[in-house]
Amino acid sequence: MNRTARVALGGLLLLALASWLVPLFSAADPLAIGDVVGQRLLAPGARDASGTWHLLGTDRFGRDLFTRMMLAGRVSLAIGVGGSLLAAAIGVLIGAASGWFGGWLDRAVMAAADALLSIPRLILLLLCAALWRPGVATVVFVLAATGWMGVARLIRAEVQGLRARAYVDAARTAGASERRLLLHHVLPNAMGPAIVAATLGVGNAILLEAGLAFLGLGVQPPDPSWGNLIAGGRDLIVNAPWVAVAPGLALIVTVTCCTLLGDAMRDRLAGERLLGERA
Amino acid sequence: MHAVIRRVGLALLLYALVVTLVFVLVRAAPGDAADFLIPPNATAADAAQLRAQLGLDASPLVQYARWIGGVLRGDLGTSFVERRSVSSLLVDALPFSIWLGATSLALTFIIGVAVGAWQGSRRRGAGDTAVTIVTTAIYAAPSFWLALGLVALFTAGAARWGFPVALRLPAFGFRDPSAEAHGLAAVADIVRHSIIPVSVLALIGAAGIARYTRTIVADLAGQEFVRCAVAKGVSRASVIRHHVLRNAWPPLIVLAALALPGLVAGSVFVESIFAWPGMGRTMLRAIAARDYPIVMGATLIYAAAVIAANAAVDVLLPVVDPRRRT
């Protein structure tokens, strides 16, 4: 792994760890609303009347922003990773079946994927979010339902290429069942591009979740997510810019780390394939 | 010519699939349109009458046939809330979105290709690294967050730090309701209102295009025909323009079509934040009001744009790239 990828992975792990630990050890309850008048919109680094220090200040209800941001990080990271993993799992399943069996199944599945890809993903998400009740489970499910097509296409192409390779024929001649051929000989070799796509998909899913939450169609307050924290800071952007700026920066750092990690994995995969073909 | 007809036919087939998909999605959702329209104190008979009026009592197959027939005739149903035909509502909003999208897409490409080509020709230099960090961060930034920042900068920031009057920009709307309605003044007013929304979309778009262009140009720069041109003494600028960029156009045109869904997503947020009277805002308001016919109609128009763009690229590629002509 190169240096950029290590830094990106380290950043993501640190953020995940912080969002898990900070709310556990924070003195203030991130959801409870206390002395609003005395504590609202304290600037970053300020102390409130009781002497508690607020690293990133407080929001309009006097809640500690840093604690809320880390709590939101749990939600955003979980939705991003969960949505992307579920999408990748569905994509691998559908793509493998499509590439391995071919025929009408392949044609039907690829037509459905083409149709879904013709609708911009955000619009598809909005349509689904409008039809079903918003919430964490809905968002994860909808992210998966609108995100499997890319992985499915990649896996299908890989499986189609691998199906005709000599080592697969050799395994078949040796008496391996179709199931064993697909699961033990073909799929493991086809997973590379899917893993890269899933990594890049995490950043994308986090951004989409933030967008839905910003529009009020994702995670609902008082539960924080980076998107609804930014929405909460929307009309405070002039007088208390930290309320919207801090979660935005957290989003940018997270998504950038995912992109860098995915890019590094793709470069490495391309390099390995080049070497493999030469050997 | 044969290939063009084939490609258009394929696009229409795909569009028919999308129309079906939207119908299936809405049917699969819990409840139907009548659930939102029936007042809580209505009797069962009233509810049944309303369902019959909306055609919801027919079998799914009949409803599907009606839906397809309506789409073919350009009839997307009637808005629950506004009691107007959905197509006329969306046609009113469309020009605002096209203006926003077209100017942003043009700027995206001009800025993105220029920055990416500059980076690609100086790969791994200090300037390249600095610009890469900036483009990666902008590419990762949510459009609504950038929009809030730019609004704060050009309204409150402009007042606090004494920006020149030309840089104190309006924070929302398409035009000033009290301004001159005709002539050059009206155009200038619209342009002033467009600066921040277009900048947000163009910044994010250009960051993405620059990242791709950098890779494409760097790959091309290592090829033998470029080394040959450099060796025979062609100037650096000329090599980049005539040898490298000429070969970068085909992938960039493909990229333009691929960038469209992202642009649509960005414009939905931008239209919502800037109260821009386009399709995105119309769709969001319809979602809040559970006005499904508008949501379905807007989805179809966005999908039509994406399908048409993809088809146009496939038809255009052989024109730009002689290697693809058959």
Image: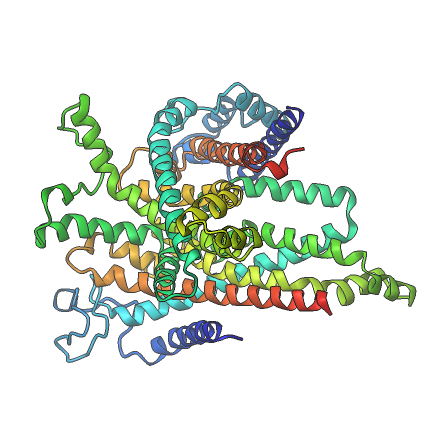
Nearest the viewer among B177 and A232 is: B177
- Residue furthest to the top: B73
Quadrant of the drawing holding the C terminus of chain A: bottom right
Q: Is residue A257 above or below residue B319?
A: below
x, y percent for residue B15: 58, 31
Q: Residue at x 44, y 30 (%)?
A: B43
- Residue furthest to the front: B232
x, y percent for residue B69: 57, 21
Q: Is residue A85 left or right of residue B81?
A: right
Q: Is residue B80 above or below residue B205?
A: above
Q: Residue at x 26, y 75 (%)?
A: A28
Q: Is residue B67 left or right of residue A101?
A: left
Quadrant of the drawing holding the N terminus of chain A: bottom right
Q: Is residue A220 left or right of residue A197?
A: left
Q: Is residue B118 visible?
A: yes
Q: Is residue B252 above or below residue B8?
A: below
Nearest the viewer among B202 and B300 is: B202
Quarter of the view holding residue A273: bottom right
Q: How many marks?
A: 0
Q: Is residue B288 visible?
A: no
Colouring method of the image: rainbow
x, y percent for residue A99: 73, 52
Q: Residue at x 44, y 56 (%)?
A: B120
x, y percent for residue B218: 49, 57
Q: Residue at x 77, y 67 (%)?
A: A184
